[in-house]
Image (tube, rainbow, N blue to C red):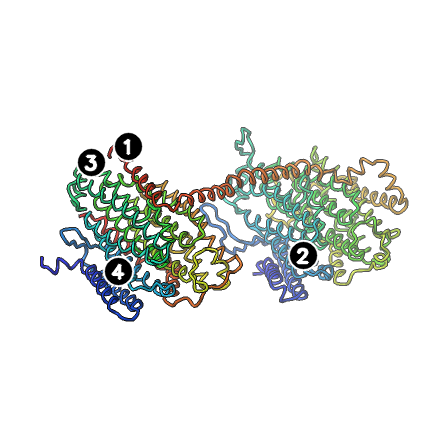
Amino acid sequence: MSWTSAFAPVLPEIWLAAAAMALLLLGVFQKEDPFARISRLAVGALAVTFVLVVGRDDGRVAAFDGLFVVDEFARFMKGLVLIGSALAIVLAEDWLVKERAQRFEYPVLVLLATVGMMAMISANDLVSLYVGLELQSMALYVLAAFQRDAVRSTEAGLKYFVLGALASGMLLYGASLLYGFTGTTGFEPMAARLREANQLPLGALIGMAFLIAGLAFKVSAVPFHMWTPDVYEGAPTPVTAFFAFTPKIAAMALFMRTMMTPFGDIGPAWQQILVVLSIASMGLGAYAAIGQDNIKRLMAYSSIGHVGYALVGLTAGTGEGLRGVAIYLAIYLAMNAGAFAIILGMRRRGQAVEEIPELAGLAKTEPLTAAGLAVLLFSLAGVPPMAGFFGKFYVFMAAVNAGLFVLAVLGVLASVVGAFYYLRIVKLMYFDPPAEPFERPMPGAVGAVAAASALFTLLFFAWPAPLVAGAEAAAQALLRLP
Amino acid sequence: MLYGLIVFLPLIAAIVAGFGGRALGDRGAQVVTCGALIVSALLSGVAFYQVAWKGQPVTVELLTWIDSGAFDVMWSLRIDQLTAVMLVVVTWVSAVVHVYSVGYMAHDPHIPRFMAYLSLFTFAMLMLVTSDNFVQLYFGWEGVGLASYLLIGFWYHKPSANAAAIKAFVVNRIGDFGFGLGICGVFLVFGTVEFDPVFQTAPGFAGKTFEFLGMKLDMLTVICLLLFMGAMGKSAQVPLHTWLPDAMEGPTPVSALIHAATMVTAGVFLVARCSPLFEYAPDALAVVACIGAFTAFFAATVGLCQNDIKRVIAYSTCSQLGYMFFAAGLSAYAAAIFHLFTHAFFKALLFLGSGSVIHGMSGEQDMRRMGGLLAPLKITYVLMWIGSLALAGVPLFAGYYSKDAIVETAFMAGGKLGSFAFVMGVAAAFMTAFYSWRLLFMTFHGQNRHPDRHVIEHAHESPAVMLVPLYVLAAGSIFAGALFAQAFIGEGSPIFGASILVLPGHDALAQAHHAPLWVKLAPVAVGLAGIALAWWMYVRRPDLPGKLAAMHGDAHRFLLNKWYFDELYDALFVRPAKWLGHALWKRGDGKVIDGLGPDGIAALTLDIAKRATRLQTGYVYHYAFAMLIGVALLVSWYLYRGGM
């Protein structure tokens, strides 16, 4: 194997890491405010990475002795993550400028986090898993505290860091137990050991439980979700948006590969745990969001609930279920991008506002924005024919076909309760006396993102085939164990 | 095409006038509906000639309606002799009433709506009489029920009109429930709802039984009784008659068209149409005869004491329908339909005449406040005389031929049932004559007793647009009997052909011509006696009725209060139902279902939401603790399970 071909599968990651470092240098050496230019360049770098990722079509390729793997699943998820990162930079630009926080490190940190996420998605070994996870997390901790002169932002960063460290500790402890009881860190050898063992070693199961705890923290599944509302509320809004729709996808992808590759044969062992996590997340997401007045906090609980729904598909563990999760994540990205675009547009008298009652009567002052947000909220609530309904539909169908009836029924019930708080906002916008209008015009890029995602969620039902086909290929790649 | 036009012209007119009424204006709506109905009436005349006179029944298939498994229903128009007669009755009376309404409703603000309802009713009634299967019949049946409801409650701002409309609807539902079950029974037994196959195979099912709650029941009898239940509701037979007098809350043309001439006779039509079934269910026929005879008598007694001019005629209608039913129950379907035919003319005449009186008296309906209208309403007076003579069965007038035939049939049928019907019929004939002339004398003779002088001075004859329709009906009331008696009920009567089946041995009608002379004279004699008595009591000795009522206070109150049927139903059904409804609403729905369901769940959800929010304390160590507990639970789960 030649030197170039050994590194070929990692090319997008290498390119992105190099781009991030180059942009960092560029920013430091530039005299005038480099923020806008670096942002654009970062989006460009992400676009190139996207082409590098999805442009290749060479099936499953492993690098570094199986530490790192690229397959259809990785391509699908990396595509989503790259789109999410680019959207996070696009949405942030105007907001950060207005809040006087337009430091060029923001796009660079997003790029570095993205490198970490891509490493996570392709991780095929406990070691590469941990390296990717930490690379991502370190960047995210800094991002959460990005408004370093704001108390809430620094508090959010600190909380996230402390709890993230705890979670990493658990994850590492689990990894060490797994290594101890199976004698390997590679996903595929580990799968083989577990398959061959007459009786599953209890230590390996406990190791897996710790590993799951660590991963559950990253996707913010109950009861490892506690950081989410505080960090979402405290972090600057563009960062919250980024947290909501990008690292979550990467972490979910990592979760999926970790469950399916090394532990694919002992599905029943982890299904029991995931059922509990999933039900608890759906339930808490639905109930706790009802009491919230801050829209970012509400979106935090909303994201907890959505992780619960996505976990339903993973729990099913079938091709159908994995496909459901992949579709769910794509739709979730679109819905959240739109919702956060509109939240970022909530400014009054030069200040960002985050309280839900501020949206009262939006239908009268801004009928178009209100209609877009209503579509997104209906979609988040899972009302047909919006995209969100199909996301839920695919995972619940998979659960039913896998015989997980209780899970599916509880999921549907939770989404009924959850519909309440989404619809409450719709009611507020359409039936309450109008509050003072927001600062307008909305920045072009933000408005475009909001409009595009609203249209996507509204019209998804008309042509779902491409997304479903991509998700199907991704799911099959994950199922085809070597 | 011809038949299609007859049926669908009124529908088109109803749609045009109903939805385009605003654009057309009052005059436009009147022209459209009246024009459509007059054309339809003329075409019906042609249809009557072709089908009934020449004896060529036809069936026009329109389209498939329901095709579900073995259940196959067509929309088709079945025009046989029976239908042709009904077509003529319905379209002619309807056309006349449409024209009359132009004058009667001239001051109403909702003329297009009224005309559209009338036309809609006519369409539904035509659908009913032209149906070729039970389901289509049911469609028409419910259609006329709907139109009747809409028209009784036409003056929706009057609470009494709304109450009457609801009452009519609910009471009819009871009958229709039976009717619906009857249709289900037909499908269950015969496997089809088309008339022809059902009627052809009916003899094979005669005497067959089925088990129900341990009882052996005759199939055809049960089916016929269920169907008759519908007829009882629609045709206001005891005990489902209570809605008809209240239905007089509707405008008078409605009373004439729906509650005298056409809709209420649908029950009679149904029994005649199903004669091939009823003929094989003699027990059901006996029930029909019994109920009919009793209703004829009962309604006549109530009619004696009513003071509202329209209510008197309403009870008269009820009574006459009783005649038709007992004729049908004695297998004299032809006589029943003939009476239906003549009755349509003179009863519509009486109603529209009373409408003319009400119109002249500025809306007054209480006969105790009338009198002395002879001078201002001469033409109406003459017309009411004609209607009353026909109703009382005075020779040469229409009612004489049909009613006499029925009474004679009852006598010749013999047996307990026939004798009962005969006695009831003659008694009712006496009372009919009495209350008809009581109405005439109280309304037109003596002094005007209205307390408002202005109304008396204002009393006036109706305009030509209201009188011309009355002339048409008067002509029918005089000549319809003499002209058609031979064709309908003459010996060897050919007109109904195969559309009505009478088994040998049930031919009391054919025997009627051989009744003894005293039987033939009895109805006329008692009729004249009734007229004489009315004259004696209300013209010669106007103080007598009051004295008589005082002497027999209980009897008078009993009749005045309609045998306390309404009070009985109120106590038996209405109040318990209200109590039950209230209890279910307040306790069942409000406390139990809402309390545990929507309200309870909502409260519980809020409670959980508050607790869930409180979990989020903001302290990092709480969060870390929660994570540790979480991982501890996960690990303990595996330890507890002891591996897999």
The answer as to whether the residues below labels 1 and 2 share one chain is yes
Give the letter of the chain under mark 3. Answer: A
Q: Mark 2 points at which residue?
A: B94
Nearer the observer, B68 or A417 = A417
Q: Name the residue under label 3.
A: A201
Q: Name the residue under label 4.
A: A111
Label 2 CA crowd tier, 10 Å (few <14, some 14–19, many 20+): many
Give the letter of the chain under mark 2. Answer: B
Give the letter of the chain under mark 1. Answer: B
Residue A380: image x %, image y %? 40, 53
For the residues labelled 2 and 4, the Cα–Cα distance comes to 85 Å
User: Closer to the observer: label 3 or label 4?
Assistant: 4
Judged left or right of residue A283, residue B497 is: right
The answer as to whether the residues below labels 1 and 4 share one chain is no
* Quarter-of-image position of residue B470: bottom right
The quadrant in which the C terminus of chain B is found is: top left
The answer as to whether the residues below labels 3 and 4 share one chain is yes
Callout 4: helix, strand or loop? helix
Callout 1: helix, strand or loop? helix
For the residues labelled 3 and 2, the Cα–Cα distance comes to 93 Å
